[in-house]
Image (cartoon, rainbow, N blue to C red):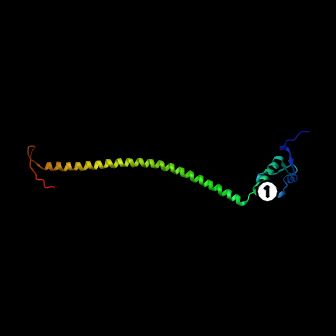
Amino acid sequence: MATQSLSDITLSPSEVRDILNADNEEIISLCKRASIVPKRNRRGLTYFSYNDVKRLQEVKSMKNSLVRITPNAVVDKIMSSFSQMEEKISNNILDTLDKKLEEKMQGVEGMAAELIKVQTENEKLKNKIIELNRENVHMKMELEKFEKIGFGFYKKYEVKDYTI
C-alpha cells in the first residue's frame, strides 16, 4: 500500500465541519475570504484538500483574533495611521518645498546681485551721457563763434555768453 502525502488527503464537508467546529454558512464565508473553491469528485461530491482545510483554519483564527479587538481600538489605530501618514506626507512636501525655495532664493540672490551691477552700470552711462551732452553744447557754442569768410577760411568772433 502506497503512503499518501498530506497534500493528497481529501476531506468531506462533514469532516471539515468537525475540524473547524463550524456550520456550512461559516465554512462558505471562510472559503470566500480565503479564496478557496471546494472541489468535486467524479460522482459530484464536494471535498476539500488538507491544504485547503489548513488555510481555512488560519482564516478562522485570524477572524477570531480580529473580533477580539474593540471597534474603538480599530478606529483609533486607523486614525493614528492616518495621522502618521499625514505627518510624513506633510514633512516630505515641506522638505521638497524648502529645497526648491532655497534653490530659487540662490537664483534670486544671484539675479539681485546682477541687477545691482546693471543699475550701477546704467547710472555710469547716464552720467556719461550728461557729460557728453554738456561737451556737445560747449562744442556747438564754440562752432557758433566761427564765421566763414571764403576760400575755406573762418574768422573767430567773440560771442557773449548770457547763460548763467
Depth order, front residue of 104/39: 104
- Residue 1 lies, with reference to residue 132, above or below; the image says above
Q: Quadrant of the N terminus?
A: top right
The residue carrying pointer 1 sits among few (fewer than 14), some (14 to 19) or many (20 or more) residues within 10 Å by Cα, namely few
Q: Quadrant of the C terminus?
A: bottom left
SS state under label 1: helix
At horizontal 84% and vertical 43% (from top left) the residue drawn is 6
Q: Quadrant of residue 21?
A: bottom right
Q: Is residue 41 left or right of residue 68?
A: right
- Residue 73 lies, with reference to residue 100, above or below; the image says below
Depth order, front residue of 72/163: 72
Residue tagged by mark 1?
29
Depth order, front residue of 139/148: 139
At horizontal 25% and vertical 49% (from top left) the residue drawn is 129
How far across and how far down the image is residue 45, in percent? 87, 52
Q: Residue furthest bottom?
A: 72
Q: Is residue 110 left or right of residue 95?
A: left
Depth order, front residue of 116/46: 116
At horizontal 46% and vertical 49% (from top left) the residue drawn is 104
Residue type at mark 1 is Ser
How far across and how far down the image is residue 33, in percent? 76, 54
Q: Is residue 72 left or right of residue 132?
A: right
